[in-house]
Image (cartoon, rainbow, N blue to C red):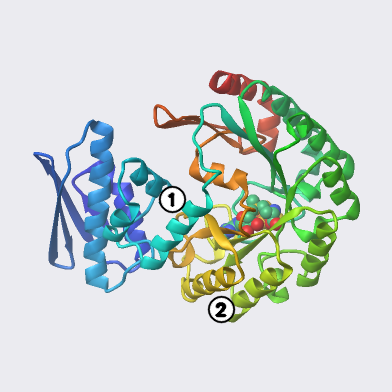
Amino acid sequence: MLTTNTEFLQAELMDVVRLFGENVPDIAHTFLHVDDTFFDTVIIAGREFCHSESHSCANELEFKRYAKRFSKLAVYQALSTVTGQSMPWGALTGIRPTKLAYAEQEAGRDFRVLFAKFGVSRENIALVGAVLEAQRGIYAKREGDADLYVGIPFCPSKCTYCSFITADIGRTGQYVNDYLTALEKEIAACRGMFRRLKSLYIGGGTPLVLSVPQLRRVLDAVLPYAGGIEYTVEAGRPDVFTEEKLRLLRDYGVTRICVNPQTFNDETLVRIGRQHTAADIVRAFEQSRRFGFDINCDLIAGLTDESVDSFCESIDRAISLSPENITVHTLCLKKGAKLKERESYLCGAGVSEMIRYSRRALLAAGYVPYYLYRQKYMAGNCENTGWTKPGKACVYNVDVMEEITDNLACGANAVGKKIFPNEGRIERVGSPKDIPTYIQKIEEILATKQKLYG
Ligand SMILES: C[S@@+](CC[C@H](N)C(=O)[O-])C[C@H]1O[C@@H](n2cnc3c(N)ncnc32)[C@H](O)[C@@H]1O
Ligand code: SF4
């Protein structure tokens, strides 16, 4: 579909081509670099487009960064002209918009100029500006700052759209106790791996699918780190909520939980394999409120056969519950989701309208956007946005999205990060995805972790 004379540009350019869907004509791209000038020639359907930009680079890394940036822009502009389409995020792919905006600011430039050049819509430029504003007071790069993540990769059943590495506890229940033993070791080993802990996050999967004694083991392991900091449990699906588990969370000092509807439409809930109804969501929400937690609700735009009206109603119902945070995801079908096997290509129709509505309604209800990120294969080329009531932004989400603090990630498939702010680099360490392998390799995992953070 796309040929280029420069191998290191191929994957990045394909990301741009993919934005325009399946039926893109063949593209021939040629790159040339002479005397600090980057030349890109793009031929599509017999039309030739030439693009040149001058920039002097300090080193090879910077040269590659700018070569990618300019060639993506050249291909995007050519495709946009030929197809008559423009994308909400223009030629921006493969980088978090807010990270790029911060990088521009740190270099003393207004990020809006670069974003406009890249064809990012005015609404999205304003969205990024609002996110940066909401992150004030949380966004800080300090060596030794860390967040602790604990992954519980078990769920009551697998939702059709989900590509997270989580398993149906009915099939993997026999591993839970050994998993928790390995996890306890890993959590204990995190002591001494940070200077200041900013937040705790027990995520999933669905942590509340664990039995009370199992949940208590996790909370006990995390207890030495708790107190005085934000402490989230991604409690998750309303079908596993009980008074007893919620009380336990409160007694252990948890400050924030997730009660995730995804949608309030009962028919969609059946279609996506969630074994609960909209009424269960409201019940779990009200039950959780009585324990005084801050609450986050996740919704997804673009779920199978869901109409724009139905999604808008879900937004309105979430707002009417008045949670502190509402996260609006755009459906993203990656390898691993059951749905992917049936739907080879995403239909973006309507999704952009859903996202537009969510922004209007959430702003009108007093929420502000406080983090956002994009992934490949997102319906309508949209984004995921975390919304918050003013002053209630989740520290953990900001830190993880902006990659400004070390992430001490524990559990199967957890990806830990060590940030070197003065060198401008990040090292990552990933644990095995598969639960039995994680259990078996725990000593090796601890040694690797010790090397990175110790
Ligand atoms: C790791 S899941 C854990 C949440 C919890 N297990 C639940 O389902 O309530 C975090 C969130 O990712 C979102 N998510 C999962 N798969 C997705 C997909 N394919 N596209 C968009 N969002 C997705 C959902 O909104 C989900 O609540
Ligand atoms: S969306 Fe949540 S409950 Fe559903 S499979 Fe994914 S992690 Fe599990």
Q: Is residue 115 visible?
A: yes
Q: How many marks?
A: 2
Give percent across and percent down for residue 303: 59, 69
Identify which residue is drawn at 73% across, 50% down. 256
Identify which residue is drawn at 65% across, 20% down. 192
Q: Nearer the viewer, residue 79 or 226?
A: 226
Task: Please tell me whether mark 1 or mark 2 is closer to you in this view.
Answer: 1
Identify which residue is drawn at 24% across, 58% down. 75
Q: Which residue is mark 1?
A: 98
Q: Secondary structure at mark 2?
A: helix
The three-letter amino acid code for the residue at tag 1 is Thr
Q: Disc 1 and disc 2: Cα gap in Å?
A: 28 Å
Residue 37 drawn above or below residue 259 = above
Identify which residue is drawn at 75% across, 58% down. 237
Q: Which residue is mark 2?
A: 308
Q: Nearer the viewer, residue 413 or 173?
A: 413
Give percent across and percent down for residue 271: 67, 70
The C terminus: image quadrant: top right
Find the residue positioned furthest to the right. Answer: 244
